[in-house]
Image: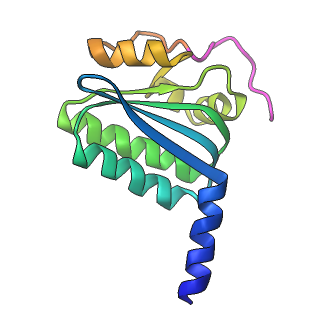
Amino acid sequence: MPESFEAGRLLADEVLNVTVSEVTAGTTLCVVTGEIDLLTGPGLRQKLTDIITSAPAHLAIDLSGVQLLASIGLSILVEILDVQEAAGYHLALVAGKNHAVVNALKTTGLDQVFDLHDSVAAAVEACSSGIRPAHPSATDASAPLTGH
């Protein structure tokens, strides 16, 4: 059994990549690319949890390179938001014009919950200021929902 678990973990690492850097004093940037689904979600949850517990800071998560954002990914983002808010830190998401991410957030109403941005620079600025814009910039309420 350990071999199949290891193979699953290696496969998950191939379809999801997470890079982390400190972009400003007190703000961490996490760039996520690939697919967030049942296979990769647990690893992403662990990585994000490790980031915010080992070095508490404001967090900007760049999802503009995500091709699939399944319900587990949405759940993980909500969990991280709750932890960040409870600790007094800001969470900003970068969705850009990524339809896979924007549509998942809009369909569930989470576009109204998260602080969304079109660029990493805007997300980092929001983390630095700690001010959430009244209307998330990454989503246009008048834009129709579309498939892939």
**Quarter occupied by the N terminus:** bottom right
For image coordinates 23% across by 48% down, the residue present is 54
Residue 67 in which image quadrant: top right
Colour convention = rainbow
70 shown above or below 125:
below
The region drawn magenta spans 138-148
Residue with the most extreme bottom position: 1
Q: Position of residue 10 (x, y in %)?
A: 60, 67
Residue 31 can be seen in this image: yes
For image coordinates 49% across by 19% down, the residue present is 120
* Residue 32 drawn in magenta: no
12 shown above or below 102:
below
Q: Position of residue 77 (x, y in %)?
A: 45, 42
2 shown above or below 86:
below
For image coordinates 48% across by 41% down, the residue present is 19
Q: Position of residue 45 (x, y in %)?
A: 43, 54
Q: Is residue 56 left or right of residue 1?
A: left
